[in-house]
Image (spheres, rainbow, N blue to C red):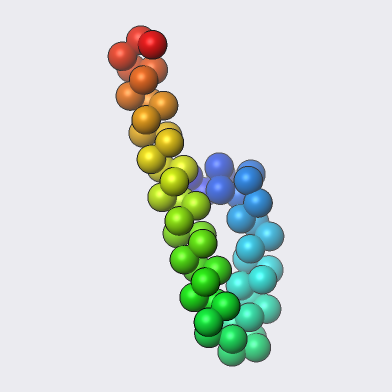
Amino acid sequence: AATVVGFFGAGGMGWYLQRHVQQLDNERVAAIILSIVALVLVSEILSAWARARIMRGK
């Protein structure tokens, strides 16, 4: 999941996360963390769906 998320742009989110942590901007830090978690969850769901489809032979 981390590779997929990084490929689709979450790698740059780390820079923003670090910047806002240093500025003690907790609202933005929470939003960035929630965004990363959402991206990981979506990629895991899509991966499981694709894997199940492949295993069924479709």
Image: 36 above or below 2:
below
Q: Position of residue 8 (x, y in %)?
A: 63, 46
Tally of numbered tags: 0
Q: Residue furthest top?
A: 57
User: Which residue is at 51% across, 62% downward?
Assistant: 35
In the displayed structure image, the side of residue 6 where residue 41 appears, left or right: left
1 and 42: which one is in front? Answer: 42
Q: Position of residue 16 (x, y in %)?
A: 66, 71
Image: 17 above or below 7:
below
Q: Quadrant of the C terminus?
A: top left
User: Which residue is at 38% across, 26% downward?
Assistant: 51
Q: Quadrant of residue 20?
A: bottom right
In the displayed structure image, the side of residue 10 where residue 45 appears, left or right: left
Image: 39 above or below 4:
below
In the displayed structure image, the side of residue 27 where residue 44 appears, left or right: left
Q: Position of residue 50 (x, y in %)?
A: 41, 26
Q: Residue furthest bottom?
A: 24
